[in-house]
Image (cartoon, grey):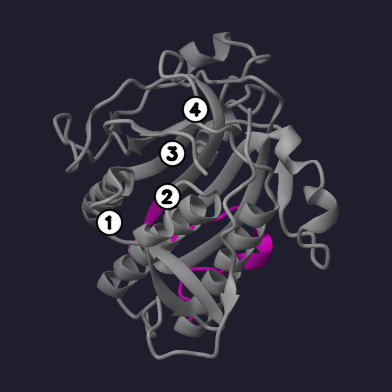
Amino acid sequence: MATAQLSHSIKIHKASKETVFPSQITNEHESLIMVKKLFATSISCITYLRGLFPESSYGERHLDDLSLKILREDKKCPGSLHIIKWIQGCFDALEKRYLHMAVLTLYTNPKEPEKVTEIYQFKFKYTKEGATMDFDSSSTSFESGTNSEDIKKASVLLIRKLYILMQNLGPLPNDVILTMKLHYYNAVTPHDYQPPGFKEGVNSHFLLFEGEPVNLQVGLVSTGFHSMKVKVTTEATRVSDLENNLFQENSTTEIAHQGLDFDEEEEECNSHIQRMNFAYSQQSSEISRKKRKVSEPVKVFIPDRK
């Protein structure tokens, strides 16, 4: 049984000096700061507009004319504190260039964590020059070496799209459980590495949706040093009006029936195999893939969101 989504929305304000992203990105350190902030802003956007935590768990920052809600420490809401620790753990893995993908998953039955209701994927890549953040939309992609202004424009556009997407999705079930699995680049990640707040997890490419899953490809931001790619997977019933209402001018959000996003090299070699098996997919493809090292945190239960 689902309730109406909490009434969180975007506010439009005049430009403020208190901005979210750095004004210049000229080296790897500045790029890392940019990617961290874009990741944290995206997670905050998702949790706020999906009504997961109360207003008191968020502070306010500005991005051009947008007033954004950013997660902050709220001792009255232990769940939000856990999410902040997850974000900080991701920062540690990003700094070491180990993190390949962070997957934020929502499910409803604690005995069936593989039966999910919504997934948010953040995939990272690193270049010799620096970092990139990839969100799967050619219209917001910028090649390595683009200037700071282009990167900022792409970031602002991506956050706007993510906000609009969250506001157009149908409501979640009353009670949900959150977890975040981290996938690493095995070639460079020490076998015993675990970022703060995480423990060794099980790498499974098999998840179930009770309904029909659809993927929403959100966009791409590249700094020339790092990259991060975001994809949203949710139940089809929550996006029934999305194709008509979302991004009508440019049709920049792609909708697909796919699964977890893996490396392009893997996709070229195994293009005939669906990347992640949902309820009606073949399970045999799992044995053909090399399993990545995975970390996971303590699950967060969010009861009866009203």
Q: CA distance from mark 1 to mark 3?
A: 23 Å
Kindly state the secondary structure of the residue where label 2 is placed. loop
Q: CA distance from mark 2 to mark 4?
A: 16 Å
Contact, mark 4 vs mark 3 (Cβ under 8 Å): no
Q: CA distance from mark 2 to mark 3?
A: 19 Å
Q: Nearer the viewer, mark 2 or mark 4?
A: 2
Q: How many marks?
A: 4
Q: Residue at x 42, y 50 (%)?
A: 53
Q: Residue at x 79, y 59 (%)?
A: 251
Residue at which label 1 appears: 74
Residue at which label 3 appears: 103
> Is residue 131 magenta-colored?
yes
Q: Which residues are magenta?
A: 124-147
Q: CA distance from mark 4 to mark 1?
A: 23 Å
Q: Which mark is residue 53?
A: 2
- Quadrant assignment, res 132: bottom left
Number of other residues with Cα within 10 Å of mark 2, as a class: few under 14, some 14 to 19, many 20 or more = many
Contact, mark 1 vs mark 2 (Cβ under 8 Å): yes
**Amino acid under disc 2:** Phe
Q: Residue at x 46, y 20 (%)?
A: 289
Q: Is residue 221 above or below residue 237?
A: below
Q: Which mark is residue 264?
A: none
Kindly state the secondary structure of the residue where label 4 is placed. strand
Number of other residues with Cα within 10 Å of mark 1, as a class: few under 14, some 14 to 19, many 20 or more = some
- Quadrant assignment, res 12: bottom right
- Quadrant assignment, res 203: top left
Q: Is residue 102 above or below residue 65?
A: above
Kindly state the secondary structure of the residue where label 3 is placed. strand
Q: Nearer the viewer, mark 2 or mark 3?
A: 2
